[in-house]
Image: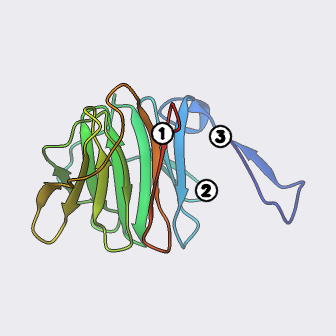
């Protein structure tokens, strides 16, 4: 992992397991408004504050993500991070370190999260589902058409509240 300041091209920093990174296989990185990096690796969630690396540990003292591939990270507000792992989706308060697991989501789902922290997912059977964080419920959205032989690769919720779906076949 190489970090550098674009404005000062000579200012670079390489981070690795020697610096405390849990694994050199990095899958996702997001940065909060304070410049803190949240780094998802093959072996857990790491936090880089610009000076030291820390492996994420929850408020209850558990290391939920150790030994767990962090497939995707989503930062929705300054203190809210979502981590998609091979076991499902976790909602993390980065300030209090509280972790809430969102149940009933196929860990192979492709997701995106809107500004209100509502989650849209295309599951392994190519159905489109919506998770309302206020009611804590999943709803299947009828009328979504992705061929069952196709595979969703990525979805993106645009600022215009349009859900863009990118699939292997482009259908």
Which residue carries the number 2 mark?
51
Q: Of tags 1 and 2, which is closer to the observer?
A: 1
Task: Give whichever of discs 3 and 1 has the lower sequence position.
Answer: 3
Compared to 126, does 46 lie above or below? below
Apparent side of residue 158 relative to residue 84 in the rendered image (left or right):
right
Apparent side of residue 132 relative to residue 135 in the rendered image (left or right):
right
Which residue carries the number 1 mark?
171
Which residue carries the number 3 mark?
15
Task: Give whichever of discs 1 and 2 has the lower sequence position.
Answer: 2
- Residue 13 % position (x, y): 74, 47
- In the drawing, what numbered circle is on residue 95? none
**What secondary structure is found at the residue carrying circle 3?**
loop
Compared to 26, does 164 lie above or below? below
Residue in the image at 54% along x and 62% along y: 36
Residue in the image at 37% along x and 67% along y: 114
- Residue 97 % position (x, y): 28, 60
Residue in the image at 10% along x and 59% along y: 137
The image quadrant of residue 59 is bottom left
- Colour option used: rainbow
- Disc 1 to disc 2, C-alpha distance: 45 Å
Task: Give whichever of discs 3 and 2 has the lower sequence position.
Answer: 3
Who is closer to the viewer here, 56 or 132? 132
Compared to 38, does 24 lie above or below? above
- Disc 3 to disc 1, C-alpha distance: 39 Å
**What secondary structure is found at the residue carrying circle 1?**
loop
């Amino acid at each position: 992992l190489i970090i550098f300041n674009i404005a000062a091209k000579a200012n670079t920093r390489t981070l690795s397991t020697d610096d405390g990174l849990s694994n050199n296989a990095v899958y996702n990185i997001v940065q909060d408004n304070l410049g803190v990096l949240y780094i998802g690796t093959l072996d857990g969630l790491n936090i880089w504050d610009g000076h030291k690396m820390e492996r994420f540990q929850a408020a209850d003292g558990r290391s939920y993500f150790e030994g767990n591939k962090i497939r995707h990270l989503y930062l929705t507000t300054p203190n809210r991070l979502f981590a998609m792992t091979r076991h499902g989706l976790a909602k993390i308060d980065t300030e209090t370190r509280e972790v809430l697991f969102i149940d009933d989501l196929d860990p192979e789902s492709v997701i995106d999260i809107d500004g209100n922290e509502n989650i849209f997912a295309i599951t392994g059977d190519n159905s489109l589902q919506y998770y309302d964080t206020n009611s804590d419920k999943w709803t299947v959205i009828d009328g979504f058409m992705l061929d069952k032989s196709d595979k969703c690769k990525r979805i993106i919720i645009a600022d215009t509240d349009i859900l863009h779906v990118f699939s292997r076949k482009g259908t």
